[in-house]
Amino acid sequence: MPSGYAIIANGLVKRYTTWERRGFLKRVKRVVEALRGVSFTVRWGEVFGLLGPNGAGKTTTVKIISTLLLPDKGTASVAGYDVVSEPVRVRERIGVVLSVERGFFWKLTGRENLRYFGMLRGLRGRQLDEAVERAVRLVGLDELGAVNKLYEEYSLGMKARLALARALLHDPPVLILDEPTLGLDPPSARRIRELLIRLARENGKAVLITTHNMFEAEIVCDRVAIISEGRIAAIGSPDELKGMVAKSVTVTVRFRAHRAAATSLTGLEEGIAKALGTRNLRVEEEEGSNNLRLRVLVKPGEEEETISRVVAVLSGLGYSVRSIEVGKPTLEDVFIALTRRGEQA
Ligand SMILES: Nc1ncnc2c1ncn2[C@@H]1O[C@H](COP(=O)(O)OP(=O)(O)OP(=O)(O)O)[C@@H](O)[C@H]1O
């Protein structure tokens, strides 16, 4: 394993300037502060996750580290090379998979696509054959019988594996993946997650992923940085992060959704937050049922009071409660607590 850190991000700041249309001819300049000083390090042999809600700055961060975007302020290095002054050396050492993968040839097979990209990386002859077959085997494209299919016939899962195979062609020590399992079915997502863990543990690679999926962060990542509104809210192992709210308990209330009741989920969340006097809560739809789920983080001893107030608010709004549980916080609860802190201020 090379010495030092695989990735160092130090005080990254990035602003986007956009022009918003106001009326027919008028355009107003708007500055979006995507990153407001993002710092973290990724070690060799670990999977590191940038976890945050939409618009938090995850993609902007990985684009800077992948040399696809320049920071306005701050520095970043990969394997000791600076992303701004030594981009070629950085690119030689990274494999990148962005969430919207473009650039594959629709009329070529998976293998032909990989051969083409391998040649762009300077691979030829036996070296190229071996690199392509190794990457194909690693991601399991051979098992799916997909290597000889045209790219245009690929399912989303096959496309994701091919993109990962392309990133692995030159056997880079650092892998950077933006939402690697977005839109994949559970078996395909599991396969990719297992592979990322293996590449870190067995091959000593540093793997940086972005995700807004807590479950993924908890099972795949050795360490996680929670990013919110362009700032890192916390960094640690999933257990360490859970320890931050370990002195809290979560109350989960499931209730039947019905159309006549309160309008949007956000509206409902706001109403309950006001009634309870806390913002450490979230309302969401429960997959595969007609239920809504409210999770609220409270101090031990406050459970009963919280439950009776939640039940009163919900029945006042015409919802019927299906079940109530009190339990230990999950990474999701940490996430809610940390990403809501800014809103409270
Ligand atoms: N090219 C751009 N021009 C203007 N604003 C941008 C641009 N790219 C991103 N932004 C804005 O910068 C902020 C951070 O975006 P970014 O894509 O990095 O977030 P993200 O955490 O990856 O979100 P998502 O999960 O939705 O992909 C957002 O407010 C976004 O709207």
Image (cartoon, rainbow, N blue to C red):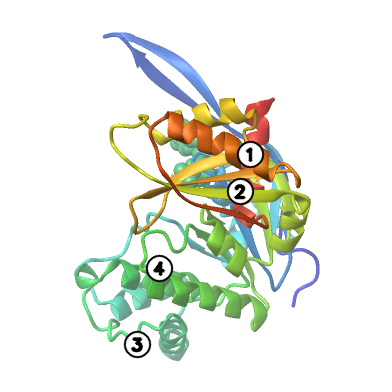
Q: CA distance from mark 3 to mark 2?
A: 46 Å
Q: CA distance from mark 3 to mark 1?
A: 54 Å
Q: Quadrant of the N terminus?
A: bottom right
- Mark 1 vs 2: CB contact within 8 A: yes
Disc 3 residue type (three-letter) = Asp
Secondary structure of the residue carrying tag 3 is: loop
Q: Which residue occupies 50% across, 31% down?
A: 313
Mark 2 or 4 closer to N-term? Answer: 4
Q: CA distance from mark 3 to mark 4?
A: 14 Å
Residue bearing mark 4:
163
Q: CA distance from mark 1 to mark 2?
A: 8 Å
Q: CA distance from mark 2 to mark 4?
A: 41 Å
Confirm or reject: label 4 Cβ below 8 Å from ligand 1. Answer: no
Residue bearing mark 1:
306
Q: Nearer the viewer, residue 315 or 345?
A: 315
Q: Which residue occupies 65% across, 32% down?
A: 278
Mark drawn on residue 142: 3
Q: Please name which of the two marks, 3 or 1, marks the residue nearer to the observer.
A: 1
Label 1: how many Cα within 10 Å (few below 14, some 14–19, many 20+): some
Residue bearing mark 2:
251
